[in-house]
Amino acid sequence: MLPRRLPTLLAGLALLALGACAGASRNGSALLVHHVGAYGQAAPTAVGHRNRVRVVVVGHSVRGREILARIVGAPSAHRRILIVGCLHGNESAGEAITRRLRSVSPPMRTALWLIDEFNPDGCRANTRQNADGVDLNRNAPWHWRALEQPGGTYYSGTRPLSEPESRAINRLINHLHPAVTIWYHQHASLVDDSSGGSLAIESHYAHSVGLPLRNYGEIPGSITTWQDVTYPQDTAFVVELPPGPLAASSIARHVGAILGLS
Ligand SMILES: [Zn+2]
């Protein structure tokens, strides 16, 4: 079921994306800057669009870097698929998949929401954690507990959603209700079926990309498990890519598997 505010929110984003406003640039591409104050803090902020790919700011990192989502397809599409290329900053191979997806034609009535970097500070510093030293995949509300100390590999923060990145993704998912969410990690080379999503979807994805379907173990503070428990009709799962950058043929297989989800 659609969240009540979502159609209004998305209609607003679409209207704003059609209007012209101040120019800005990021990575050399022209963006149009907009603000969506009317929807309050809980809504993503529209930044602009390029061709039919709309760009929205869904939050900011500890260091103030934008967390950007690109919407491929109609923002009002009933079915939404969220793909996150990089959560742990030193596991960035999945960004090649989200970047490639910017230029695909999504299936009918489907919009792809693409986030290259959910943890832009960690991605810049090549660290697993965010700039507070928190493992963002131990910071979600599901069975959160204090793990390790600051500086530890799996430090879970001071409380659930203590980190601005965690609050941003939590807000986005509560607004968006993505039917399917894929979180890319490295380097275990598997599709993880432990978080409680649809086994049929996870198994189909694993088969399509040639990775084994495995139970990688439940972890307290897992974003993926929080999603699957909170929205049991939807499916979120982790794909652990192999070490190193992906070959072009692998990127193509993952893109094909995502388009096949619809
Ligand atoms: Zn990871």
Image (tube, rainbow, N blue to C red):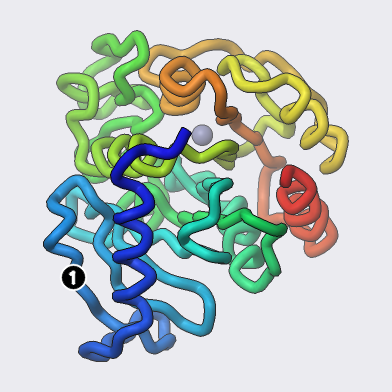
Residue drawn at point x = 48 percent, y = 19 percent = 225
Res 167 quadrant in image: top left
Q: Quadrant of the rendered structure where residue 245 is?
A: bottom right
SS of the residue under disc 1: loop
Q: Is residue 179 left or right of residue 165?
A: right
Amino acid of disc 1: His
Q: Position of residue 226 (x, y in %)?
A: 42, 20
x, y (%) of residue 144?
A: 30, 13
- The residue at 36%/63% (across/down) is 11
Task: Write the residue at 56% across / 30% down.
Answer: 236
> Which residue is at a point 41% across and 59% down the rendered structure image?
69
Q: Position of residue 123 (x, y in %)?
A: 40, 54
Label 1 packing within 10 angstroms: few (<14), some (14-19), many (20+): some
Please indicate whether residue 202 sits to the left or right of residue 43 in the image: right
* Closer to the camera in the image, 31 or 163: 31
Residue 189, compared with residue 91, is above or below; it is above
Examine the image and state in which quarter residue 15 appears. bottom left
x then y, percent, for residue 59: 25, 53
Q: Does the beta carbon of the residue at mark 1 sit less than 8 Å from ligand 1?
A: no
Residue occupied by mark 1: 35
Q: How many marks?
A: 1
Closer to the camera, 251 or 228? 228
Asked whether, in this view, residue 90 is left or right of residue 261, the answer is left
Relative to 258, say whether 20 is above or below.
below
